[in-house]
Image (cartoon, grey):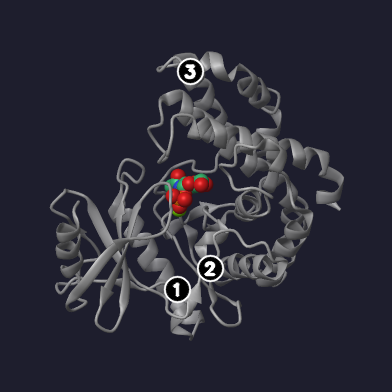
Amino acid sequence: MNKEGLMKTASSFAIGEVLDCVPFGNGLINDTYLVNCTHKKYVLQALNTNVFHDPCGVMENIEQVTAHLEKKNDDERSVLHLVYTEDGKNHVIGEDGKFYRMTVFIEDALCLEKPDDPKDFYACGFAFGKFQKDLSDFDASKLHETIPDFHNTPMRYEQLMESVEKDVVGRRKQVEKEITFAREREAFTHILFDAHLPLRVSHNDTKSSNVMLDEKTHAALCVIDLDTIMPGFSVTDFGDAIRYGANYANEDESDLSLVGINMELYQAFRKGFLEGNEGSLTNEEVRLLPYGAKMMALEQGMRFLKDYLDGDIYYKTGYEEHNLVRARNQFRLVEDMEAHWDEMCA
Ligand code: GN1
Ligand code: MG
């Protein structure tokens, strides 16, 4: 939608006069904009309804979870706040037919895309650990499972193999090596489900870029991007953060010699995550943290590979082989974790 349309959509929310609306952030699924008003800023997002088939369910989850978090956090900046329309709706349908929702922009805060200072990554770990701890007395059965089986790695494996069989755009011949790589790790994909881990309220998209830090102190403030909150495992939240943030390289780096697990960052995040959780993880969960890390790197590689085989229909891509590059990157990370396995489990 053009700027005028976006500003009009933004004005449907009860925020007063809208001065400007510009693209913001770099998520792979939703479209995000920063909205400037006279005194305040807001974040407007078009939710990708090809990915989130039940956008109202997503919004209900966010409402319930933020209400619960508000009871435990006094600082206004430590919980994401939804913005409503004059008649109390949590979303509007834009002229382009898309589903728009709005949150308050968090002031005097920063979001590091991928921190390289262990102290900052510790803060991210603390934020996600505390998020889980704060929600440990929230009844997970009240949540909609907005993307069923989101981190069900064995199912992600099956879905990849279906795409391999279908080979709809004829790319299979380029990725035989990657398919073999996934096949060799099929047994591993079952480990977390076989462990009967406790079901918790999990965030499920624990990129470091989904944590806001205080601009001055860099202390953890707030966890954002609450779209994938669902019942899940604590170790996959840990793992997703590691595969994204403790990779020496970005997840779409094509020079595989730069990809690898940064053990210093790994340990920093682990410490933060455990401290944020205040010792509420079971011994089995703590033991399986490194498995969660490898699982998420493997799963993400399989998801990127599947999307490449499907013709790039799920993730935003910038060029023809973007998803393949991302898949190879994640698989290289898996290999490097395997090389550091003893150290990761120590
Ligand atoms: C997607 O759009 P973003 O960056 O918040 C994806 C995550 C992936 C991530 C990979 C709903 O998240 O699961 O880990 O891309 N979100 C969904 O960068 O599929
Ligand atoms: Mg996300």
Which of pointers 2 and 3 lies earlier in the amino acid sequence?
A: 2
Callout 3: SS: loop
Image height of 278 relative to 267, above or below = below
| Tag in front: 3 or 1 | 3
Please name the residue that numbered disc 2 is placed on.
135
Whether residue 280 is visible, yes or no, is no
Q: Amino acid at mark 1?
A: His
* Image marks 1 and 2: residues in contact by CB distance under 8 Å: yes
The residue shown at (66%, 46%) is: 196
Q: Amino acid at mark 2?
A: Leu
The residue shown at (78%, 59%) is: 264
The answer as to whether callout 3 falls within 8 Å of ligand 1 is no
Which of pointers 3 and 1 lies earlier in the amino acid sequence?
A: 1
User: Percent from the top left, x then y, of residue 202?
Assistant: 54, 57
User: Percent from the top left, x then y, of residue 297?
Assistant: 63, 41
Q: Work out how far the residue at label 3 is from the one at label 1, CA to CA, in angstroms.
A: 46 Å
| Tag in front: 2 or 3 | 3
Q: Work out how far the residue at label 2 is from the one at label 3, CA to CA, in angstroms.
A: 43 Å
The answer to which of 301 and 4 lies nearer the viewer is 4
Please name the residue that numbered disc 1 is placed on.
68
The answer to which of 188 and 145 lies nearer the viewer is 188
Please name the residue that numbered disc 3 is placed on.
171
Q: How many marks?
A: 3
